[in-house]
Amino acid sequence: MTRENITYYLSVITKIMAAQHFTNADFEEKVIKSDKPTVVDFFATWCGPCMMAAPIIDKLAEEMGDKVLIGKLDVDENPDVAQKYGVMSIPTIIIFKDGKEIERKVGFPGEAGLRNMVEDLTK
């Protein structure tokens, strides 16, 4: 393996790890009780548009993680939270602030749309 390959794989791993992964067990503590506004990407591993959104979610988490908590919740592995918030289609992006849902977007809004949603939280 070359140095370039190692550098590439490390950058991919870093990006994959950028967004947090929430579960049924920790959603209340990490999202609802967060002192930061929180963006949650409700997704599934088999969902094409979700996979298109994934690197953008990670990129935004890396860039804005000091101001906004950004994470993902796999609806197949964590159906209780998805059901509680009425997530019927994926991807669905829900923004929480002070323990309450303040915005929701069903479908992938593209990088610009997602970035605008997140940047609006930091104003």
Image: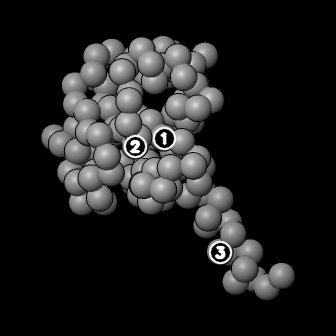
Three-letter code, disc 1: Phe
Nearer to me, 49 or 121? 49
Q: Position of residue 72 (x, y in %)?
A: 49, 38
Q: Tell me the distance, in whole angstroms, between the alpha carbons under discs 3 and 1.
A: 25 Å
**Given the current orientation, which residue lies at the most extreme right position?**
1
- Residue 16, compared with residue 24, is above or below; it is below
User: Nearer the viewer's eye, disc 2 or disc 3?
Assistant: 2
Label 3 sits on residue: 8
Asked if residue 96 lies left or right of residue 15, the reply is left
Which type of secondary structure does the marked residue at label 3 adopt? helix
Instruction: Give the number of the mark in front: 3 or 1.
Output: 1
Neighbour tally class for label 2: few under 14, some 14-19, many 20 plus, Cα within 10 Å: many
- What residue does disc 1 label? 43
Sequence-wise first label, 2 or 3 = 3
Alpha-carbon distance for marks 2 and 3?
A: 27 Å
Q: Horizontal placement of 28 versus 67: left or right?
A: right
Amino acid type, label 2: Pro
Question: What residue is drawn where x is 27% and y is 21%?
Answer: 101
Within the image, what quadrant is residue 14 found in? bottom right
Which residue corresponds to the image point at 22% horizontal and 25% vertical from the top-left?
102
Q: Secondary structure at mark 1?
A: strand
Asked whether the viewer can see residue 87, the reply is yes
Give the residue number, with chain letter if any, for mark 2.
91
Q: Report the number of discs.
A: 3
Q: Are marks 1 and 2 in contact (CB under 8 Å)?
A: yes
Badge 3 crowding class, 10 Å Cα cut-off, few under 14, some 14 to 19, many 20 or more, is few
